[in-house]
């Protein structure tokens, strides 16, 4: 009798374990749902669904179901629904485990007319690039899965040829914000002015930094607000309306070579990339790029327009000592000295451009020749009004626009201090604080997501970047055309369509397809879905990419479970027929 009951006892024991596992999975899923609403999908995927312990629970449940099914072996025909149901659930669990471990999910961000094959993953990595050896080290991180832990102590050991870099991430802010403080406690000439602009009910206050190409000017309404710090009287006279025309459309680079008292003027040529000899010397200049309106874009330096609003030139100076790279700004002559690097050629270089003599229409230009401030206002016809002395706190009026401006604070030797604080535990604007140690040298910096920072460690320089992880796809996707379809009479998007070209170079396959909201592109196990887009002069599509090797098992498991349910109903129907 006991022998007959022992299989039943074992079955009941496995059933109790299965129920306990199901309850545990339900609790984890409920917690994961709350976790996702607070920290996002990427965090919950890494912390919960792709974690080894959660997949171990799923695997243990699959083993338990398999043991429960074999408890009734040898199976009979009446056991068919029972066996099919267990087999289907086991396949679903195995598919989930395989998809969690080996599945790929990310985004392709493709501007119109361009091609992309690097997939951006939902997880972030820490990338360290060493300039000298041109090597890049990438380490996976999980800061976003522990958003509530702000004081980290993550250390990374990175070999740099014969030396070792010790990089410590001691702080992680998931929702960082930048607070800036500007005081007059600087030690070098770095003019900064706080300007208040008023126009009827509109009023703004902002800081301008004369030696910063990104913060020396701003547009406000119909006016251009600019701040200059000329080094010489001639430069100041040009801004005040006494120009000395350079007569070269791209400007002139002036070079004073070692042991030479003569200044050599080299006009910036229209054709770049060719060596230009400096007459009578063994030195040459090779112009790399010219920017009429310099700005820093996501991909690096760009020119915002063809108007010489902020002209800059990049070139290399070559001589017997070696090669030096230079980036000079016509409107910021002392920028290179403030942000300069050591050079092997002891030469003095300067860049002049006609733009220093011209001001845009409807401009308010502040001029800092010394410890005092001057100002120049231009109207629509470029007529200038000069304010010889600007008093702090006094209001001045633009002669044609009627805007009122005043200087609230002015520091000839400004010190800019930036404080990073955290607003909440929501993952919105991530930033990390890194400390690099190389032998006796140490440097630290805040690194924002997708914004690299440079650490200067003695003569070494490393670039630290906190960015999404990437993975190369076996195919290339080119966006030929993107269309946003709006609801009639509105600007609300009803759908997106992208005409793409898929190229598989290894297989010699080229496909032309249209991807829309409910029409994905599927190829070699990869699915490309139209997710969103980025508006602009060049429209950019965002494709969600997924490759889940466990999906066939999941689908097969669902079909087998459905087959078990159907066989259960058919079996009951036959049994009732026999009883009748």
Image: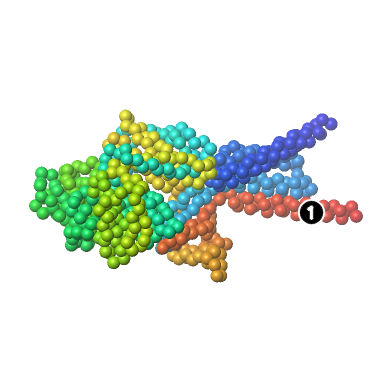
Q: Residue at x 72, y 53 (%)?
A: 563
Give me the residue at 41% from left, 40% from top.
419
Would residue 295 be found to the left or right of residue 60 on screen? left
- Residue 249 locus on image (x, y percent): 22, 62
Question: Is residue 61 in view from this perspective?
Answer: no
303 or 243, which is in the foreground? 243
In percent of width and height, residue 144 lies at 51, 41
Q: Which residue is mark 1?
A: 569
Based on the displayed image, in which of its 4 quarters is residue 250 positioned?
A: bottom left
Q: Quadrant of residue 94?
A: top right
- Left or right: where does residue 465 sit relative to residue 175? left
Q: Position of residue 85 (x, y in %)?
A: 72, 48
Q: Quadrant where the C terminus lies?
A: bottom right
Vertical placement of residue 132 versus 477, above or below:
above
Task: Tell me what residue is drawn at x 26 percent, y 45 percent.
Answer: 371
In this rendering, does residue 394 appear at all? yes
Q: Observer-nearest residue: 479 or 272?
A: 272
The local crowd at label 1, few if under 14, some if 14 to 19, many if 20 or more residues have their Cα within 10 Å, is few
Q: Secondary structure at mark 1?
A: helix
> Where does residue 237 sit, x and y in percent of width and height?
20, 55
Q: Is residue 139 left or right of residue 76?
A: left
Figure label count: 1
- Asked whether 328 or 496 is in front, the reply is 328
The relative height of residue 247 versus residue 64 in the rendered view (above or below) is: below
Decide which of 388, 428 is in the foreground and name it.
388
């Amino acid at each position: 009798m006991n022998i007959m009951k022992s299989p039943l006892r074992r079955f009941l024991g496995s059933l109790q374990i299965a129920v306990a596992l199901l309850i545990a999975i339900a609790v984890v899923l409920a917690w994961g749902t709350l976790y996702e609403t607070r920290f996002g999908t990427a965090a919950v995927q890494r912390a919960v669904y792709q974690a080894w312990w959660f997949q171990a629970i799923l695997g243990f449940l699959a083993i338990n179901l398999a043991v429960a099914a074999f408890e009734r072996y040898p199976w009979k025909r009446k056991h068919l629904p029972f066996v099919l149901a267990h087999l289907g659930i086991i396949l679903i669990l195995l598919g989930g485990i395989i998809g969690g471990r080996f599945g790929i999910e990310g985004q392709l961000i493709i501007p119109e007319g361009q091609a992309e094959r690097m997939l951006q993953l939902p997880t972030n990595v820490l990338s360290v690039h060493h300039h000298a050896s041109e090597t890049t080290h990438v380490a996976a991180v999980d800061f976003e899965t522990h958003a509530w832990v702000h004081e980290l102590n993550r250390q990374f050991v990175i070999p740099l040829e014969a030396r070792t870099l010790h990089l410590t991430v001691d702080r992680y802010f998931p929702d960082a914000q930048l607070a800036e403080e500007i005081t007059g406690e600087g030690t070098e000439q770095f003019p900064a002015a706080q300007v208040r602009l008023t126009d009827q009910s509109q009023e703004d206050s902002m800081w301008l930094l004369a030696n910063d190409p990104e913060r020396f000017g701003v547009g406000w309404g119909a006016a251009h607000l600019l701040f200059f710090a000329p080094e010489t009287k001639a430069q100041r006279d040009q801004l005040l309306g006494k120009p000395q025309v350079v007569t070269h459309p791209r400007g002139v680079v002036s070079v004073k070579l070692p042991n030479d008292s003569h200044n050599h003027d080299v006009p910036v040529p229209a054709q770049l990339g060719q060596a230009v000899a400096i007459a009578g010397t063994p030195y040459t200049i090779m112009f790399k790029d010219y920017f009429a309106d310099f700005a820093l874009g996501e991909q690096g330096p760009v020119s915002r327009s063809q108007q010489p609003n902020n002209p800059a030139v990049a070139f290399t100076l070559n001589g017997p000592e070696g090669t030096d790279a230079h980036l000079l700004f016509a409107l910021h002559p002392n920028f290179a000295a403030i942000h300069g690097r050591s050079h092997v050629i002891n030469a003095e270089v300067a860049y002049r451009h006609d733009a220093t003599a011209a001001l845009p229409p409807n401009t308010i230009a502040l001029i800092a020749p010394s410890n005092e401030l001057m100002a120049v206002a231009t109207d629509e016809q470029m007529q200038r009004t000069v304010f010889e002395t600007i008093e702090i706190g006094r209001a001045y009026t633009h002669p044609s626009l009627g805007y009122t401006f005043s200087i609230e604070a002015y520091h000839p030797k400004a010190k800019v201090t930036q404080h990073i604080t955290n607003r909440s535990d929501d993952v919105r604007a991530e930033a990390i604080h890194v400390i690099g140690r190389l032998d006796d040298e140490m440097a630290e910096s805040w690194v924002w997501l997708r914004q690299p920072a440079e650490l200067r460690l003695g003569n070494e320089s490393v670039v630290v970047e906190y960015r999404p992880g990437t993975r190369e796809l076996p195919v290339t996707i080119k966006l030929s055309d993107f269309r946003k379809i709006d609801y009639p009479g509105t600007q609300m998007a009803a759908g997106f369509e992208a005409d793409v070209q898929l190229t598989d170079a290894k297989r010699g396959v080229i496909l032309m397809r249209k991807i829309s909201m409910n029409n994905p592109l599927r190829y070699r196990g990869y699915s490309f879905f139209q997710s969103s887009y980025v508006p602009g002069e060049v429209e950019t599509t965002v494709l969600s990419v997924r490759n889940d090797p466990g999906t066939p098992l999941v689908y097969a498991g669902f079909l087998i479970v459905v087959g078990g349910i159907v066989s259960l109903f058919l079996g009951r129907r036959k049994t009732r027929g026999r009883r009748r």
